[in-house]
Amino acid sequence: MLGKRQITHGIPAIAAIALLLGLTVLGLPSTLAQQNTPTPTVPVQTQVWLDLTATAGAPPPAANAFTATYEAEFANAVRTVTAASQSTPVTAPPEPTGSPTPMPAGSESALRASASELVPVTGGVFLMGTTLEEASQAVDECALYGSTCDIAWTADSMPAHPVTVDSFQIEVLEVSAQQFVQFLNEMGPNSHLTGCEGQRCAATAAEVESSFITFDGQEYGLTNEDILADKPITSVTWYGAQAYCQAIGRRLPTEAEWERAARGPENYIYPWGFTFDPARANSSQSGTDGTTNVYEYQVSAGPYGAVNQAGNVQEWVADWYRSDYYAQQADNPTANPQGPPTGTEKVLRGGSWDTGPLFLRTVHRRSAQPFETSPAVGFRCAADALPQPAGTPTSAPANG
């Protein structure tokens, strides 16, 4: 029986200080590292457990197991920053060994017909990431709503740095369970196992207790279609998210695109503004104890109209994750950043139904391995901007 582990919150304190102050941790005395190792009190709502093809009903690790995991991530973060200072390349995971399952003739058009509406997002220069002052305010806001947060969880979102993106489109809604099940059925029996770049697309209810995808050997369905059809798809891997988007002629948004869509020209901290409003998001403050329909919480809509970019489910994006990536970008800014060239985890954005305000911020980053699944992780697709008539500007001015 395999266990479960947490989605990465962000790098701990020493790595945070190293990133913020531009210091190296080479030669850091072990006693100092021990003194600065955080041992936070982590509330239930910040613990999102990932299903690693676990036996149904496996209990979450005990608190001391989480502490050990957090300390291990702390040590790994120190090694990560050290490696970055030495320009040590990150080892990429093995490439997919299989080929995507061919889509039957005519199925792509059927999938596209059921796809969510796209809204245009104006490109331009915006401020990506957060500041130490904003992070401190987020920790205070966390306490205001009864949670305990560590500022180290925000370190991988620093420093704030200007980023340029071209105009693009993003789906108004998160991909629903019904849409994804249709995709699996179009690919055929057993496609959930290897149908996405030769990798697993999703976990079924027979494999993971938290999944609501059923499979009878021939057809995919839902454990309760009347209730679940319009819920966001969960228990989906990054490979499954990417394959679905490609099947409808779209793609996953980059991390920069996702943040631009959520922040807008005013660089909002939440899609609706600069302060948390529990009425605007399905979060740990909502008392729902699960996802809501993808079209609910219209009041959460961001500047361009995307709904639920804060709360409901965290969302896979295209980029590989590195905790020090923003520090690298600040020194070497690029237009339309695509993330690190390699990695072992993919970025997650947006917070979920079981996380508090700090995790719902438009700037917050988390990560998970691309083959992992969770009852609190889904996705939405993006697309390039529609062709514009000659002479039409495609980007907003700087900071616009």
Image (cartoon, grey):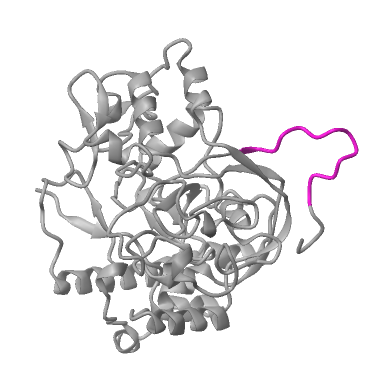
Nearer to us in this view, 172 or 398: 172
Q: Could you tell me residue 308's position as x and y percent? A: 48, 54
In the image, taking residue 333 as reference, residue 59 lies left or right, namely left
In the image, taking residue 113 as reference, residue 165 lies left or right, namely right
Instruction: Identify which residue is drawn at 52% across, 24% down.
Output: 113
Any part of residue 244 in sight = yes
Q: Could you tell me residue 378's position as x and y percent? A: 39, 46
In the image, taking residue 354 as reference, residue 159 lies left or right, namely right
Q: Could you tell me residue 28's position as x and y percent? A: 39, 83
Instruction: Identify which residue is drawn at 27% across, 76% down.
Output: 42
Nearer to us in this view, 35 or 102: 102
Q: Tell me the quarter of the picture where residue 31 sits.
A: bottom left
Q: Is the magenta stretch mostly helix, strand or loop?
A: loop
Instruction: Identify which residue is drawn at 62% across, 61% down.
Output: 263
Q: Tell me the quarter of the picture where residue 55 sits.
A: top left
Q: Residue furthest right?
A: 391
Nearer to us in this view, 395 or 320: 395
Q: How many labels does the image show?
A: 0
Q: Tell me the quarter of the picture where residue 20 sits.
A: bottom right
Any part of residue 26 in sight = no
Q: Magenta stretch?
A: 383-395
Instruction: Identify which residue is drawn at 40% across, 39% down.
Output: 176
Q: Where's the C terminus, which quadrant?
A: bottom right
Residue 338 magenta: no
Q: Which residue lies furthest to the front in this view?
A: 226
Residue 394 magenta: yes
Depicted 7 relative to depicted 389: above or below: below
Depicted 139 relative to depicted 356: above or below: below
Depicted 139 relative to depicted 318: above or below: below
Q: Could you tell me residue 106's position as x and y percent? A: 48, 12
Nearer to us in this view, 226 or 122: 226
In the image, taking residue 62 as reference, residue 312 lies left or right, namely right
